Image: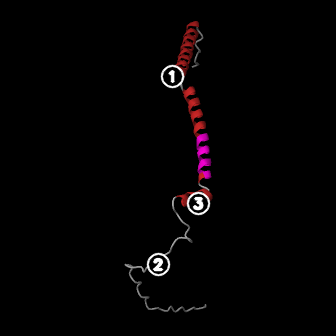
Amino acid sequence: MTARLDLSAATWRARAIRYVAIYLLLALALVAARYFTQDVRPDLRAAQEREAALTTERDELELRVQALSTPQRVRDWAFANGMRRFAEAPKTTAELTGVPAPRPLSARTTVEVTTAWR
């Protein structure tokens, strides 16, 4: 039994209508997707500009922190706030109280090792 292909005009017309309907639905889907996502690109550009501005600000703040935290500036700040060098500060000594005495050492034990060669 051999299968015959239907090559009638009605079949071709139905196929053509079906394909045109599919293409129209796809075009409609693409237009709808574009319509609903039309504000994505401007928002993305604005976010990229904000990111660039924040990156620049971060870099500038990093440089300021590095400049303000140099050893000379820290030393100047400490002296301006009444701090003194350890070598120049007065020293006082006192006995440590409230610290328990260490436990006595335990008696030493010896370890014997024997080696047997075979």
* Magenta segment boundaries in residue numbering: 55-67
Tag 1 secondary structure: helix
Q: For the view shown, which residue lies furthest in the top direction?
A: 9
Q: Which quarter of the picture shows residue 9?
A: top right
Q: Which is more toward the observer, 75 or 46?
A: 75
Q: Is residue 60 magenta?
A: yes
Q: Which secondary structure class fits the magenta region best?
A: helix
Q: Amino acid at mark 3?
A: Arg
The residue under label 3 is: 75
Q: Which is more toward the observer, 61 or 52?
A: 61
Q: Earlier in the sequence, mark 2 or mark 1?
A: 1
Task: Say whether residue 117 is left or right of residue 112.
Answer: right
Q: Residues within 10 Å of mark 2 (few under 14, many from 20)?
A: few
Label at residue 36:
1
Quadrant containing the N terminus in the rendered view: top right
Q: Position of residue 25 (x, y in %)?
A: 53, 17
Q: Earlier in the sequence, mark 2 or mark 3?
A: 3
Q: Position of residue 34 (x, y in %)?
A: 55, 21
Q: Earlier in the sequence, mark 1 or mark 3?
A: 1
Q: Position of residue 41 (x, y in %)?
A: 57, 27
Q: Amino acid at mark 1?
A: Phe
Callout 2–callout 3 Cβ contact below 8 Å: no
Q: Amino acid at mark 2?
A: Thr
Gap in Å between the C-alphas at discs 2 and 1? Answer: 78 Å
Image vertical order of residue 69 relative to residue 13, above or below: below
Q: Is residue 63 magenta?
A: yes
Q: Which quarter of the picture shows residue 60?
A: top right
Image vertical order of residue 72 relative to residue 26, above or below: below
